[in-house]
């Protein structure tokens, strides 16, 4: 409907304002397997922005040479080039035009500053102009999902119907509540809370709906090599094997399997000789309660204190 009779494969995203009005459509050329199409260089791809009446505005464009206006099948097309990588043969070709109140902005990153990039840009401009006018009505009146990005008091965070019950009930009095943020969009549904002591010690508490990737990071309590910080000397970038590195930095335990020993394995003591303030350090880990994931990182709490906090969530 937006690109009728297109001679190239495209994937596109429609972007909306909060009130549901269409802002723009961003389309990219894709390869045969559906991935964004590149041509021999990371910077070589095709991007088309479509803007209807009252929609967004184009990005500012800096042309290396004065852009030219041409008549293409009765449509005024402004086109130019920007050699944005110097002398290595990569250039950005740009064309903008309007058909029946619908504006198009085409960007073509090409690894040849010669005729091939210009020829390809010309083909795409002609393809759009000679085909039927885009029908943007198919994108009107969208179903607007729940969207939130809201700062909360601790009391409001505790009463959140989805995640409030997974906030720690009691923390040592030296930890002062600093902030909480409730966030929902099409990909993320989460609650974040943060406490600190006014010094170096702090508690970060993130609660969310687990993704498929989060579930891939679930570790068994018996898999010590995937989460025990005492097994590897610092710097971990040098000592942790590549095949378990992602588990090691963000392990997820099933709530029913979590033990005090597992928490001890994520916790270490820093002394003044290490160049840090002395105290307990807890590396990030997650605990999965059915369809709720709690991810934490802490400074200053002992393994026994952390265990008590999680015991209070059961």
Image (cartoon, rainbow, N blue to C red):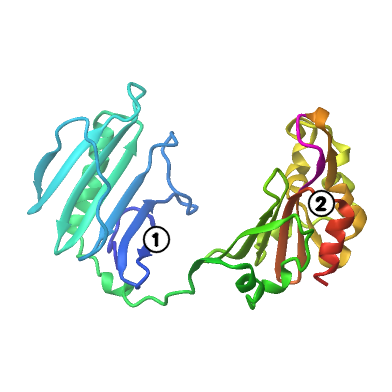
Q: Name the foreground residue: 175 vs 205.
A: 175
Q: Quadrant of the N terminus?
A: bottom left
Q: Are marks 1 and 2 in contact (CB under 8 Å)?
A: no
The image shows residue 133 at horizontal and vertical percentages of 20, 65
Give the numbered dot on residue 13: 1
Tell me where the magenta segment starts and ends, as one range: 275-283
Which quadrant is the C terminus positioned in?
A: bottom right
- Residue picked out by circle 2: 301
Task: Tell me the quarter of the picture where residue 41 sits.
Answer: top left
106, above or below 286, in the image: above
Residue pictured at 70% horizontal, 69% vertical:
292
Give whichever of discs 1 and 2 has the lower sequence position: 1
Residue 54 is situated, as x and y percent measured from the top left of the image, at 21, 65
- Report the mark closest to the observer, 1 or 2: 2
Give x and y (percent) for residue 306.
83, 57
Q: Nearer the viewer, residue 174 or 8?
A: 174
Asked whether residue 282 is drawn in magenta, I would say yes
| Residue at 29%, 58% in the rendered image | 6
Which quadrant holds residue 2?
A: bottom left
Q: Is residue 189 left or right of residue 149?
A: right
Magenta span includes 224: no
Q: Residues within 10 Å of mark 2 (few under 14, many from 20)?
A: some
How far is mark 1 from mark 2, CA to CA? 45 Å
Circle count? 2
């Amino acid at each position: 409907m937006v690109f009728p009779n297109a001679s190239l494969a495209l994937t596109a995203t429609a972007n909306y304002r909060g009130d549901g009005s269409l802002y723009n459509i961003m389309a990219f050329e894709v390869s045969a397997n559906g991935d964004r199409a590149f041509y021999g260089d990371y910077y070589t791809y095709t991007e088309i922005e479509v803007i209807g009446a009252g929609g967004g505005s184009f990005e500012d464009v800096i042309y290396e040479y004065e852009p030219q206006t041409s008549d293409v099948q009765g449509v005024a097309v402004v086109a130019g080039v920007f050699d944005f990588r110097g002398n290595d043969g990569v250039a950005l070709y740009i064309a903008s035009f309007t058909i029946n109140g619908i504006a198009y902005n085409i960007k073509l990153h090409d690894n040849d500053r010669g005729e091939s990039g210009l020829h390809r840009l010309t083909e795409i401009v002609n393809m759009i102009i000679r085909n039927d006018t885009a029908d943007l009505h198919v994108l009107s009146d969208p179903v607007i999902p729940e969207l939130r990005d809201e700062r909360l008091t601790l009391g409001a965070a505790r009463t959140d119907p989805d995640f409030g019950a997974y906030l720690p009930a009691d923390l040592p009095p030296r930890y002062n509540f600093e902030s909480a943020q409730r966030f929902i969009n099409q990909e993320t549904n989460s609650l974040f809370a943060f406490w600190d002591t006014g010094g170096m010690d702090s508690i970060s508490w993130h609660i969310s709906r687990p993704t498929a990737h989060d579930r891939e990071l679930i570790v068994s309590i018996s898999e010590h090599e995937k989460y025990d910080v005492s097994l590897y000397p610092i710097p971990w970038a040098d000592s942790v094997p590549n095949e378990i590195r992602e588990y090691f930095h963000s392990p997820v335990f099933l709530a029913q399997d979590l033990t005090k020993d597992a928490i001890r394995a994520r916790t270490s003591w820093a002394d003044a000789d290490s160049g840090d303030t002395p105290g307990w350090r807890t590396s990030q880990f997650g605990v999965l309660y059915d369809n709720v994931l709690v991810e934490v990182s802490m400074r200053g709490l002992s393994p026994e204190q952390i265990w008590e906090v999680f015991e209070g969530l059961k």
